[in-house]
Amino acid sequence: MTTIQAYGALAGDQPLQPLQITRRAPGPHDVQIGIAFCGVCHSDLHQVRSEWAGTLYPCVPGHEIVGRVTAVGRHVTRFKEGDLVGVGCIVDSCRHCEECEAGYENYCDGMVGTYNGPTDDPPGHTLGGYSQQVVVDERYVLSIRHPESQLAAVAPLLCAGITTYSPLRHWGAGRGKTVGVVGIGGLGHMGIKLARAMGADVVAFTTSESKRDAASQLGAHEVVVSRHTEEMAAQQGRFDFILNTVAAPHSLDDYLALLKRDGVLALVGAPSSPHPSPNVFNLIMKRRHIAGSLIGGIPETQEMLDFCAEHGIVADIELIRAEQINEAYERMLQGKVKYRFVIDIASMGGQA
Ligand SMILES: [Zn+2]
Ligand SMILES: [Zn+2]
């Protein structure tokens, strides 16, 4: 066991603070990773503040982890000391169900999250990446092929990247397809970059006129301000696929009407209260679909990282020190981040 520095909360109504936590010594199949950077995801905030059911304390969030391998167990074959690696939202799963065998560990009923998941080594619950070091079975560790200079900006690919890549790939975003991306935040800004790199015609949707230029710079061919009724009307029946990243409850009918026959509206944002029920006529008139998607499996997360390395894609980030995390949460709630905070773990001091 190793004692390391971390940042976490002792209760849902308390701010995050420095904590000391313990990690297991690497077992035969484990990879020990010295964490360099960890992205800050909206899920971290929901979980640590007990806005989702079942938060266990102390809660150390963080599932956008990048760093270097510092030790490997004797049966580890895919990694060696010094490799640049990442860990996303998943650190274990049942490994034998239909989902695990298909590489969809994200849909396994026994999926163990990188934080707040069950573990008996050490006994308790998993503690995430706002910490100096983590030990993970090699099956759930990803290789990073970006240059080291981009490492901080690679971190958000481990959740925001895969959450948008998986549905874009699954529903065939690519050349000749018209793809919409709704919302230009942590998820949406990745969705725009990825859909563009896949070769699709990309239209970004935002409620705010002020994001028009930013969306174009991210790679959107067109930007629609969804509050402008006439701009929305001009988009009717155009889209093969729309990726909706907005978590706040809103009318899905506005976007269903923009789909072609057989078009798909995929939801990846987790609303705190339900969206209003859609008008069924918007579905049956053109055989349209509403779908959902959750992060991605381990093989497709590796595929996404390799795709991003090949296309030079990283997240747009603001690097912060660990002690700025509470302030960063407040700014995230106000939408005042372009587009992802990443914690510089070296700022925790006192190397593990
Ligand atoms: Zn996340
Ligand atoms: Zn499974």
Image: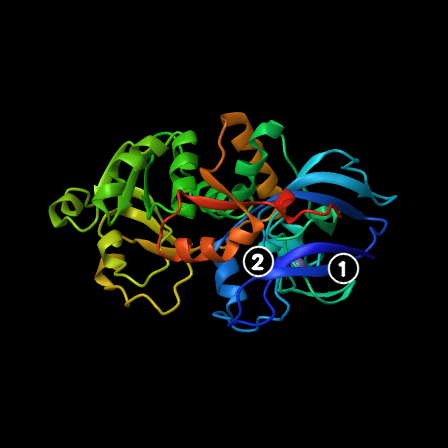
Q: Where in the figure is residue 30, as x and y percent of width and height?
A: 79, 48
Q: Where in the figure is residue 67, as x and y percent of width and height?
A: 67, 40
Name the residue at 68% across, 58% down.
93
Q: Nearer the viewer, residue 352 or 248?
A: 352
Disc 1 target residue: 22
Compare marks 2 and 1 and give the one earlier in the sequence. Answer: 1
- 245 lies above or below 222: below
Can you tell me whether the CB of the residue at mark 2 lies under 8 Å from the nearest atom of ligand 2? Answer: no
Query: Residues under labels 2 and 1: Cα distance?
Result: 29 Å
Amino acid on which disc 2 is placed? Tyr
- Element at badge 1? strand
The picture quadrant where one finds residue 248 is bottom left
Name the residue at 55% across, 29% down.
309
Name the residue at 83% across, 53% down.
25
Of marks 2 and 1, the one in the foreground: 1
In the drawing, does residue 239 fall left or right of residue 80? Answer: left
- 290 lies above or below 165: below
Amino acid on which disc 1 is placed? Thr
Disc 2 target residue: 107
Name the residue at 29% across, 33% down.
216
The picture quadrant where one finds residue 291 is bottom left
